[in-house]
Each structure stands twice: as C-alpha cells, then as structure tokens.
Amino acid sequence: MRIHCKIVVVAICLGVFLLLYFFGGNAADEPPLGEVEKDKHFPSSSGLGKIVSENVAKLSRREPQKQVRPNRKEPKISDRGGNVSAKLRQKSVLGRWGSKVTRAEDTMHLAVVACGNRLDETLAMVKSALLFSVKKIKFHIFAEQDLTGQFEKGLSQWPVPLSSKFQYTLYPITFSVGNADEWKRLFKPCAAQRLFLPVILKDVDSLLYVDTDVLFLRPMDDIWEFLRAFNGTQLAAMAPEHEIPKIGWYSRFARHPFYGVTGVNSGVMLMNLTRIRSTLFKNSMIASGLSWKDLLHPLYQKYKNHITWGDQDLLNIIFHYNPECLYIFPCQWNYRPDHCMYGSNCKGAEEEGVSILHGNRGVYHDDKQPAFKVVYDAIHDYPFGENMFQSLFYPLQTKFLDTVNTLCGRIPQVFLKQIEKTMKAVFEQKVVRHVRPPQRQRR
Ligand SMILES: *[C@@H]1O[C@H](CO)[C@@H](O)[C@H](O)[C@H]1NC(C)=O
Ligand SMILES: *[C@@H]1O[C@H](CO)[C@@H](O)[C@H](O)[C@H]1NC(C)=O
Ligand SMILES: *[C@@H]1O[C@H](CO)[C@@H](O)[C@H](O)[C@H]1NC(C)=O
C-alpha cells in the first residue's frame, strides 16, 4: 500500500534524524580535543601556584597513589621519589591525564647545599619554591650528616596539595676530586659542593642551583624558561655580581681573572648539566681545554692563594676564559642588599619588582636590612592551607610599611610588585574556580 510505504519512509527518516541528533548532540557537549588540551595546560605558562596545581592534581586523579616510595633505601642517600623505572610504572597506571601531567620534562630540578645552621632558611626556600610554582619540582638537597634527619622530618610534615608536588633526595657532602677537607674550608663550609653538581648528578639534564638564603617571589617555572633562551654555546646562567663597576667588589679588588666588568654572583645559577659535562673549557693551563671534571682541581691549585670568595671566584675564572658559555640574566632574578644599600641600582627590579630575593650577609636574621627580613618572616610564618592573599601578602604589605625609612625599604614596589602579581594570580584563579558553571566543573 502506498500510504504504508510513506509511513515506513517517514519513520526511517525520523529514526535517522534522531540518531544523528543524539550522536551529534553528545559530541557537541564534549569539548573538542584541542580545548581540553588548552584547559589542562592553561596553568603551565602563568604563575597560578597552588590552586592550579590542586586542579591539575584532581584532573590527573592521582590522590590514591600520591607518594611513590622505593622499596629499598640506600644507606646514605635516602630517595623519597623512587627510581626511574618505578616512576615509569607509576605513570602507566595513571591513565591518560596522569601520563601527560607527569612527563619527565615537566619536572624542574632544584639543588641546594645546606650546612651548619641553615636548616630553617633552606626549608623557607623550598616552601617559597613550592607555594608559587606550577610544574613539579625535584629537590636535590646536599646536607651535613646531622641535618638529614631534620630535613626528612621537616619535609614530611607538609600537607597534601604541596607534598604531592615535589620529590626530594638527600645527599651527603662529597668531593670527587682533590682533598675534601681543603674543599670544605674554601669559603663557607661545603659551599664548594655546587661546583661538583655536574659530576654528581649524572642523570639530571638541567638544574637550578640556589643558596639557602634565596626566596622565590614568583614561580620557579619562570626562571626555568631561561634554559630555552640559551643559544648554541651557553650552558649556564647567572646575574652580575654588581650593577655599578665603581662600587663592585671584583672590579676594585679581585687579584684573579673574572667574568665581564663586575663578575657574576653564583647564588642563583641555572645550569644545563648535559652541556657542562660535554664541553671542553678553555683555561690558562692546558691549551687543548679541559672537561669540567678535570678542570676544577688544577684551577683551584693555581688560584687558591688569590681567591677571596671561594668557589664563586673559580666560576668567575672559568667564565672569564669561556664567556660565550654564559647567559646573563638581569638583577631582579638575584636581588641582594647590594642592589639597594647604597641606593637603588637594579633597574629591572624597579620596573617589574624582585623575582628572586637573595638575602646574603645574613640579613634575614639580623636587623641590618629589615626589608629583606620582613619578606623572609612572611614566607617562613605563612600557615599552610590559609588563603595566601590574606595570610601572606596582606601581613607582608603591612609590615613592610615599617621599613620605608630604610635604604632598601624606601621603594616598596621593588619588593612587593612581583609577589603581589603572583598572589593576585593565585587569588583570582581561586575565585574563577568557584564561579565556574557546574557543567564545566563536571569535567
Ligand atoms: C629501580 O627499580 C627497579 C625495579 O624496582 C630495580 O630493578 C632497579 O635496580 C632500581 N634501580 C635503582 C638504581 O635502584
Ligand atoms: C640541555 O642541552 C642539551 C644538549 O644541547 C639539550 O639536548 C637539552 O634539551 C638541554 N636542556 C634544556 C632543558 O634545554
Ligand atoms: C651565544 O651568546 C654569547 C653571549 O652573547 C656569545 O658570546 C656567543 O657567541 C653566542 N653563541 C652562538 C653560537 O651564537
């Protein structure tokens, strides 16, 4: 019958239409792949800190297996992060979000050498790195034997959103070449250890070394980016020791070669260890050049009676003969009392604020430069889990007012601008998360 045929055709058309509608509709609800990628990686370029990392942690569904512990411990080196093959297995368990988030190149490496009474200071540095950074961080902590227990205790007490963002390894102080006691006496106890990082950390490609008295006022991710700015010959990055040759130490007093006009400061040093290990360094002793490992001891023997600041002087000598190997980053990435105690001389910090604060000369612990101490105290005393804007930035801003009659506190913007930017980013991100429409949150 013709009418029957018509009904069948209409029914089929309706069916096809409905099928198309449902499949098409579902596909439209699902964000396109590109959008998912962008959303997931959104935090990585902007410094949104803890809140963002919580989001990423949730996306990656890592909570049930947040800590990878190795089954066996080596007697001296305690490795909380587990070894590479263990980590690889862990990754495969995490599924599609996890595998992206924990990619090896998404981990930054930070090294510090702590001796004597530097425990609290070092923990404050680690805290500042974790509070603001986005990517995961692997800490390589070189410490005197009697400090290792205290480090383990200190680092194990941090709450989950932070503790799931880092791993650490504790190493004893070791010197691979020459007389260990002699190296230890050079400058402060065990400061020379940093010279040996390329030799000891054989499996690490790139590393940021910082002194214990360094505080991050913005994500470590941002200084890590300088690694990508290296040209073909650059393998390390440091800031100048001074901005003004007339009052710089090296330019006035050094009795040995040094880099550039004012020398470089080694308190914040970014290193591509792979390149350092594979380069032959020009020097004043052997014309064909020497590898890093073979250079250190003869260099020390040759200059030990002429150097004042220990291993930093050796680094200056090395880069004097190999200037094409060094990338110079501006002073706001290694901001010291020298930049303000004779009047403000770090242009970059005046413009965009301090990115990394370096309280050398012990200024976090005495009253000589209250501007530095106030920042240290604010980060040191910040209670984990509290709103960072209310419990860190606001008290810091208030206390900073008491320092405006000192040379370094005279321009509050220098100290506060960058950290305020970081705090705002964290704060805004939190608000954005709360007002997200429920449909998006379901993802
Ligand atoms: C890493 O773990 C794997 C499997 O657990 C083990 O076979 C290997 O020896 C470990 N490597 C190191 C350096 O501990
Ligand atoms: C370090 O240098 C090596 C060799 O040039 C390069 O393969 C590697 O990607 C560099 N690392 C970073 C983080 O840029
Ligand atoms: C890299 O930059 C340094 C410093 O500007 C320069 O001396 C060196 O020649 C550059 N190397 C290359 C391969 O361009």
Image (spheres, helix red, strand yellow):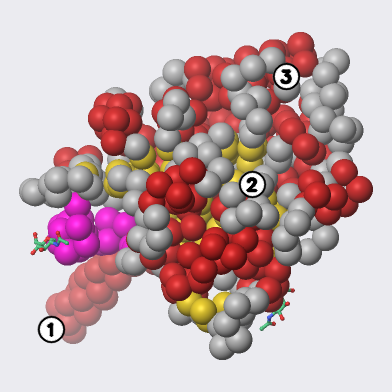
Q: Which residue is the site of mark 2?
A: 309
Q: Is residue 109 magenta?
A: no
Per the image, label 2 sits on a secondary structure element best described as: loop
Q: Mark 2 belongs to which amino acid?
A: Trp
Q: Position of residue 289 (x, y in %)?
A: 56, 83
Per the image, label 1 sits on a secondary structure element best described as: loop
Q: Quadrant of the N terminus?
A: bottom left
Q: Residues within 10 Å of mark 3 (few under 14, many from 20)?
A: some
Q: Which residue is the site of mark 3?
A: 368
Q: Position of residue 170 (x, y in %)?
A: 30, 44
Does the beta carbon at disc 1 come under 8 Å from ligand 1? no
Of callouts 1 and 3, the N-terminal one:
1
3D distance between C-alphas at marks 1 and 3: 103 Å
Q: Which residue is the site of mark 1?
A: 1
Q: Nearer the viewer, residue 296 or 227?
A: 296
Q: Mark 3 belongs to which amino acid?
A: Lys
Q: Residue at x 30, y 70 (%)?
A: 20
Q: Nearer the viewer, residue 87 or 13?
A: 87
Q: Position of residue 82 (x, y in %)?
A: 19, 52
Of callouts 1 and 2, the N-terminal one:
1
Q: Residue at x 35, y 46 (%)?
A: 173
Q: Position of residue 332 (x, y in %)?
A: 72, 45
Closer to the camera: disc 1 or disc 3?
3
Closer to the camera: disc 2 or disc 3?
2
Marks 2 & 3, CB-CB < 8 Å contact = no
Q: Which residues are magenta?
A: 82-107
Residue 299 visible to an observer of this rendering: yes
3D distance between C-alphas at marks 1 and 2: 103 Å
